[in-house]
Image (cartoon, rainbow, N blue to C red):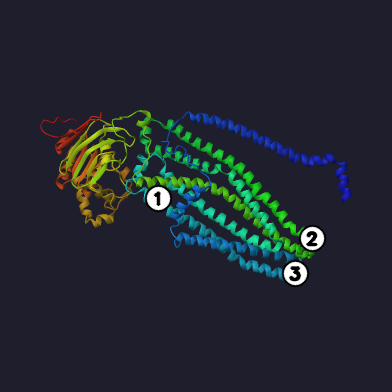
Amino acid sequence: MAPVLSKLVGKSPSLLSSILGKPIAVTGGGLALVLWLLSVHRTNQNRRAAAAERVQYVINEKNKRSAEKVAIDGTFIRRIAAILRIIIPGVFSPEAGFMVLVAAALVARSSCDIWMIQNSTSIESAIIGRNFPLFKSYVMQFIAAMPMISMVNNVLKLGLDELKLRFRTRLTRHLYDQYLKDFTYYKMNNLDNRISNPDQLLTTDVERFCSSITELYSNISKPILDIVIYVHRLAVTIGGQGPSIMVLYLFVSGVLLTHLRRPVSRMTVSEQQLEGEFRYVNSRLITNAEEVAFYRGNVREKATMLTAFTRLVRHLRRFLEFRFTMGFVDNIIAKYIATAVGFFVVSRPFFSTTHHLSSAGSSERLEQYYKSGRMLVKLAEAIGRLVLAGRELTRLAGFTLRVTELITVLQDLNNGRYQRTMVSNENGEGKALSRVPLIPGAGQIINKDNIIHFEHVPLVTPNGDVLIEDMSFEVHSGMNVLVCGPNGCGKSSLFRVLGELWPVFGGTLTKPGPGKLFYIPQRPYMTLGSLRDQVIYPDTYDDMVRKGIHDSDLLTYLDLVKLTYIQERDGRWDAVADWMDVLSGGEKQRIAMARLFYHKPQFAILDECTSAVSVDVEGSMYQYCRQVGITLFTVSHRRSLWQHHEFYLHMDGRGNYEFKPIDLDTVEFGS
């Protein structure tokens, strides 16, 4: 055989080169084609990017692409520890119990792996030794063990899925407790400009964080357990030096790959921000669909959406290219080099002349080789999984930063602190009338029934624009006030301060406590639910029962606003519909007035809320408010409403105002 081979090699070098040359040529041609396609793709991508840059938009630039460092360091450990205290509240919590269950399932799975190695080796030895009774015995053991092994695998999967779901439930409930506490949801979207897309954070980012941390728990715990088990087994079989070399390789490769993967965390944060922006521009079109349709702005909106999508795609493609490169390095370091090191380690006792295997028979050496080799393969796989888990760890760092930012902002807002760029201070725009520093929350709020008293309170927007430098007036119950002035003079700003949506920058504001001041906008909000829910909002049916109010009372309120036909049409109070679409503009305004009659607050702010209601119905509603003792602040341009008020508050839009009683000499204005 050897002479034949030598003759073939000696006489036919061209044949050998042709056999080896064709794959090399094909590979080289394929690489050249791939590089050319990448070049063409890059050119097209740059062309589309240049076109996209011509469509400029800013989504509040709230995060400024987060300058915070994202890395696997002490800061990350502190962040993840703080979140873990939320999702695992105690040692005896259900979450901790499922973590124990997953750990037990991992131990059972590792034990099953070891048993499978031993059983498979015994079956192969019986086949080689032509021992049919022994072969039959081991195969029957394997068949008998299959249900148990399958059960262990599925218990592990169930435990991980349930753990992920419980983590998400616990974290989501905590965040919503903070987000929907008082006016925090309003302040985050209108006062603070650190987070632009809370919906993205509360849904997608929380889900991905919980998935990532659960998978990481499994992907780290199982390899560590396997490494401990297989190192111990191999140390008994082939000595402790071999496994020590493998563990040392684990440490070196882990440090190297963690250093190379550092950009993953930052790119993950950017990906979630761009996903949020793309979702925002789509939801913005849905919110403003009617206005866009009137302007026929579909082409312009399409350009904006495609720009947001192009930015997202460009980032995702860069991320893919980086992951492609890192995947190439990961495979070499964590798989192939680890396998080569494993071959070296497992071969040492077989080549050694001093090891006890040197005097063993071939069948014993073969059996030990199969056992040790398979264990070493499992050890190498465990080391590879542990090294690759660093990739998931860097992504987790990105999600952790996003969730931590949300938690921090929610805590600040609930403690009365917010951050916002003061445009007037930076650009010199706005009315910088104040001669004292503008400090949000510097004013004092006193809760007192049946009075509203502004005492040297500046009317300042969250952006820092001073609308009125010093406002002072006093209104007692029974003194209806008509608020008037041009657009942008500060009418809505006054009510936002009065409703504690905006901070008080100075002075003292005396007002009734929560629930005793009601606000009705021009476009009232209709909640999801039944017809009854529209009238009693934000109360629930149980709240209504506790107040001693019945459906017959609600029908009386509907009769006062001439809407009984809605209840008669649907036939029941529990009728559910999309009330924002079902009701007309005037009907929604009258539902809001019925809602006011139900709650009977001390004061009510009516902000153009009867503009779509006839004058006679409007008059009867104002008369009923006076009968039940509801004092009104009304914003309206209707001259017919002056007769229902005793005072007027006029703002001229230039920083001046006047608060005077309405008498015979008062000049009424409006339409």
Which label sits on residue 175? 1
Choose between 443 and 147: the one closer to the eye. Answer: 443
Label 3 element class? loop
* Name of the residue lying farthest toward the front: 436
Q: Position of residue 138 (x, y in %)?
A: 68, 68
| In contact (CB < 8 Å): disc 2 and disc 1 | no
Q: CA distance from mark 2 to mark 1?
A: 65 Å
- Does the rendering let one see residue 206? yes
Q: Secondary structure at mark 2?
A: loop
Q: Which mark is residue 131?
A: 3
> Label 1 is placed on what type of residue?
Leu
Tell me: residue 241, above or below residue 31.
below
Give how far apart the Cα atoms at labels 2 and 3 are.
31 Å
Task: Say which label, 2 or 3, has the lower sequence index.
Answer: 3
Residue 571 in the image, given as x and y percentages of width and height: 26, 52
Q: Is residue 54 left or right of 548 when viewed as pictured? A: right
Q: Which secondary structure, mark 1? A: helix
Residue at numbered disc 2 = 353
